[in-house]
Image (tube, grey):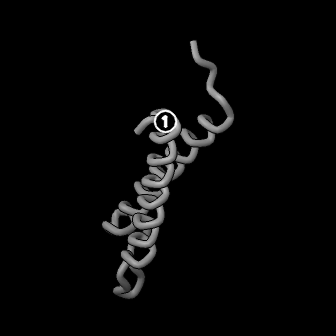
Amino acid sequence: MKVPTVISIGISLGLLCSAAVTGFGLVLASGLFGHPVDGQLPSDWGWSLVMMGSASLLAFGIFGWRRNHPGS
């Protein structure tokens, strides 16, 4: 059995946090949480969280893939 290293635990934790940020951003952008006050649009913060979460998911995913598949 392969013992996980600190880097692989960090990658997994990074993927989990990125997915949580992306999910929370989608909830904010859709208006399910943080209802608008005085007719303001709720999507400003939501879409920025979606973009940041998606970018970090992509970065952690690519780094994790390249680390686990060195010949690719």
Q: Residue at x 45, y 50 (%)?
A: 19
Q: In the image, is residue 23 above or below residue 72?
A: below
Residue 16 percent location from the top left of the image: 51, 44
Q: Which residue is mark 1?
A: 70
- Residue projecting furthest to the left: 30
Q: Residue at x 36, y 61 (%)?
A: 26
Residue 5 percent location from the top left of the image: 66, 30
- Residue projecting furthest to the front: 71
- Residue projecting furthest to the top: 1
Local SS, label 1: loop
Quarter assignment of residue 71: top left
Residue 54 percent location from the top left of the image: 41, 59
Asked if residue 64 lies left or right of residue 10, the reply is left
Which residue occupies the foreground of this view, 40 or 12? 12
Q: In the image, is residue 36 above or below residue 72?
A: below
Name which residue type carries label 1. Pro
Quarter assignment of residue 2: top right
Which residue occupies the foreground of this view, 70 or 59? 70
Quadrant location, the C terminus: top left
Residue 57 percent location from the top left of the image: 45, 52
The number of discs equals: 1
Q: Residue at x 41, y 70 (%)?
A: 46
Quadrant location, the N terminus: top right
Asked if residue 56 lies left or right of residue 47, the reply is right
Which residue occupies the foreground of this view, 66 or 43? 66
Q: In the image, is residue 35 above or below residue 68?
A: below
Asked if residue 19 lies left or right of residue 31, the reply is right
Assess disc 1: are there few (<14), some (14-19) or many (≥20) residues with their C-alpha within 10 Å of its C-alpha: few
Q: In the image, is residue 31 above or below residue 3?
A: below
